[in-house]
Amino acid sequence: MPELISQPISILAIESSCDETSASVCVDGKILSNYIANQSVHEQYGGVVPELASRAHMQNIVPVVHQALSTANCQLSTINAIAFTQAPGLIGSLLVGAQFAKSMALSLNIPLIGVHHMQAHVLANLIMDPAPSFPFLCLTVSGGHTQIVLARSPLDLEVIGETIDDAAGEAFDKTAKLLGLPYPGGPLIDQYAKTGNPQAFRFAEPQIPELNFSFSGLKTSVLYFLQKQSPDFIHNHLHDLCASVQHTIVNILIKKLKKAVQQTGIRQVCIAGGVSANSGLRDALKEAGQKHGWQTFIPAFEYCTDNAAMIAITAYHKYLHQEFIDLDASPTARAVY
């Protein structure tokens, strides 16, 4: 059983799993700051370069932590624990955040909390007011993961469906590359889709059993379709192509979510992860909720992409249960929860 804690609980959290350096301060479950430094260096390469990401984290982490503490009007002496993203992610990026967090925890003689990145995406929904009550379902969609998670409590999460190949965010970005759009292409597809016809073109929707997903076939379908067209086809139909691709991906996601609700009987439904910032998905979830009587929860945009606030809120619940890790704990590129 967790110990009874009467004093305010202040958590400093660090997120460095990919190409965003972020720090956040959480006091008694309330986010007081959430500062994010993006890395534009990767745009010219069409994707995240791990070595460059690690170097940028080392440059950003001190000013980012300083800004988070300053915005929260918080002193290091009042911090009760340091949290960091332990897994999964780019190992070089994770190491920067992990070593920084360990050093701070050691110097301040306070507990260290390791957080699973995907667990944190789900619990980002607890930042909101009102927040979902347990149990709830969460569709977690990002560049590296696509999952349906059954959340029974903050620390009791079960993946009941996931992609068997590519993630939804990867499908957005790679399709964008086929369309000649710069990296990251997912947000551009969303932007152009707003003025396109989602029914203009039909692309493959894989029939995967149970609650699992597959997006590799969709990319192939788009590729073969474009190979049959004239050189100026993409330029002349870009908005319709983006709308059709987005409609297909969102339809795949919502269909599985409906199936998950039917199987579990749980009608509180959330979304999380970078792709949850997509306007088509957000609108589709609202529409499905109204049609089927779900209670839906959608995080604010700043809590959709990688951010330290979601690490902080997860660490807060871990602190309540005294779930700390030793200073010799290592980050890992892959992990399950």
Image: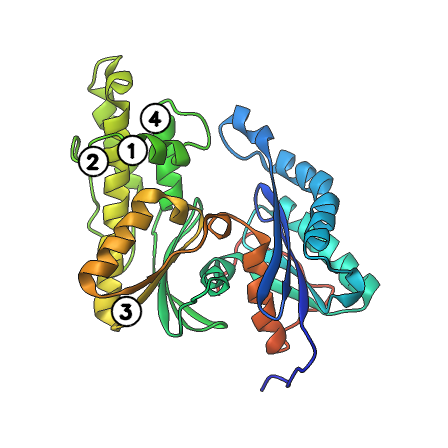
- Which residue sits furthest top? 231
Q: Amino acid at mark 2?
A: Pro
Q: Secondary structure at mark 2?
A: loop
First reached walking from the N terminus: tag 4 or tag 3: 4
Q: Which residue is mark 3?
A: 267
Q: Residue at x 29, y 34 (%)?
A: 194
Q: Is residue 151 left or right of residue 69?
A: left
Which residue matches tag 1?
A: 193
The disc labelled 4 sits on which kind of residue? Leu
Question: At label 3, which amino acid type do we have?
Answer: Arg
At which x and y percent is residue 221? 23, 33
Whether tag 1 and tag 4 are in contact, CB under 8 A, the answer is: no
Residue 193 at x, y = what percent?
29, 33
Neighbor class of circle 4 (other Cα within 10 Å; few <14, some 14-19, many 20+) is: some
Q: Is residue 248 above or below residue 40?
A: below
Q: Nearer the viewer, mark 4 or mark 3?
A: 3
147 w.r.t. 177: above or below: below
Q: Nearer the viewer, mark 4 or mark 2?
A: 2
| Amino acid, disc 1 | Ala
Tag 1–tag 2 contact (CB < 8 Å): yes
Whichever of labels 3 and 2 marks the residue nearer the N terminus, that label is 2
The residue identified by callout 2 is 198
| Front-most of residues 28 and 171 | 28
